[in-house]
Image: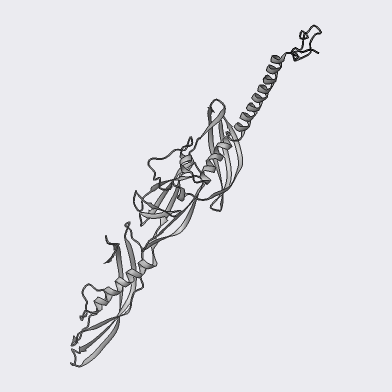
Amino acid sequence: MTTGAVEETTGPQHPSGERMPGVPGPRARFAVTWGVALGLLLVAFAAAIITLNSTVYSASGFVSAYLQSLSRHDVASIVAMPGVDVDDEADDALLRRDALARLSQVELVDDENRGDGEHHVTFSYRIDGLPGQTTFAVQHTGARLGLFNAWEFIQSPLTTVEVVPRNTVEFEVNGVPVVATSGAGEINPLQVLVPGAYSFSHESLYLEAEETVLPVTATDRVARFVLNVTASDAFEDAVEEELAAYLDRCAEEEVLQPTGCPFGKQIANRVVAPPQWEVSDYPRVEIVPGEQIGTWIVPPAHGAARLDVDVMSLFDGSIASFSEEVPFTVSYLVTFTADGGLTLTPR
């Protein structure tokens, strides 16, 4: 029995105990194994780069990232993207989460390579349920970290809507209050993101505008929108009440020609008792915008007042009761006072 240590062999050996020629040793086999693994890793890395550059970092992938941010209402991420240009001269009131419409069913339609790194990428979608399609022009700008394609918008998807609000400086867009800084009746540029659906409306005590949706699907042109604000029913009711009170005051005057009033009567015979007036038919009021911004017109409206008075005949001295419906016409310029009241000025 041998009591000494047994020497471990690590490969084929010559009977003399030496390693046989042509057979790699442990270190060589280790190097070969890791070399193969590294080669496979490099191949896999290169394949991953190619795949990412053809998907995530492609022209369509760049636009898709923009649309994904838009669907999340992530305005901060959008304005940080290359080629998204903010216009300092336009109002940014609509560049906020709650002013953006719901974007869904986004699908790539086409990715056209125009050469020299320029691509025209078209996506279809639904914006607040409305179908739409937009083509984005993008340009290849190099590589990030020397590996990944970089892109920017040639035409910014942040465009402008020129809003002309008539007869008001306040209105709502997608429920967001907006103040027309350029004034009523003037062009007020508002920055909007494309694609978008922008619902314009207005409702106050005296004024209203029917809700109108403006789809914005093109990045290469400026949209123009005129918001027509009209008098509300409450406005017409208020003017009718003001006019009725004014006519009632006129009717209280016991003269044939009430001062500054729209009705009166000339009688050839002598009046022997105070004339009595009563408004028998109040004019029905309609209100339309005036020529000047902020003014409103009551077009000619017709009414009637009943006159009762005792008169003496200049021919024979007899006394008789005179009764007649006296027609009249009113027309007014209506303006608002500083405290929200109404002023009616005869026209």
Q: Percent from the top left, x then y, of residue 330? A: 30, 71
Q: For residue 231, what is the image quadrant? A: bottom left
Q: Percent from the top left, x then y, of residue 254? A: 20, 81
Q: Determine whether, in the image, residue 88 is placed left or right of residue 347.
A: right
Residue drawn at point x = 71 percent, y = 17 percent: 29
Q: Nearer the viewer, residue 314 or 300?
A: 300
Q: Nearer the viewer, residue 82 or 134?
A: 82
Residue drawn at point x = 38 percent, y = 61 percent: 204
The answer to whether residue 143 is above or below residue 331 is above
Residue drawn at point x = 67 percent, y = 20 percent: 34
Q: Determine whether, in the image, residue 241 is placed left or right of residue 5.
A: left
Q: Nearer the viewer, residue 58 or 213?
A: 58
Please state, as top left, top right, bottom left or bottom right, where the C terminus lies in the image: bottom left
Instruction: Report if residue 38 is visible in the image.
Output: yes
Q: How is the image coloured?
A: one colour
Q: Percent from the top left, x then y, of residue 193? A: 48, 45
Residue drawn at point x = 31 percent, y = 78 percent: 304
Q: Determine whether, in the image, residue 25 is placed left or right of residue 229.
A: right
Q: Percent from the top left, x then y, of residue 232? A: 39, 65
Q: Residue furthest top?
A: 16
Instruction: Report if residue 116 is visible in the image.
Output: no
Count of marks placed on residues: 0
Q: For residue 170, what is the image quadrant? A: bottom left
Q: For residue 208, what is the image quadrant? A: bottom left
Please state, as top left, top right, bottom left or bottom right, where the N terminus lies in the image: top right
The answer to whether residue 344 is above or below residue 148 is below
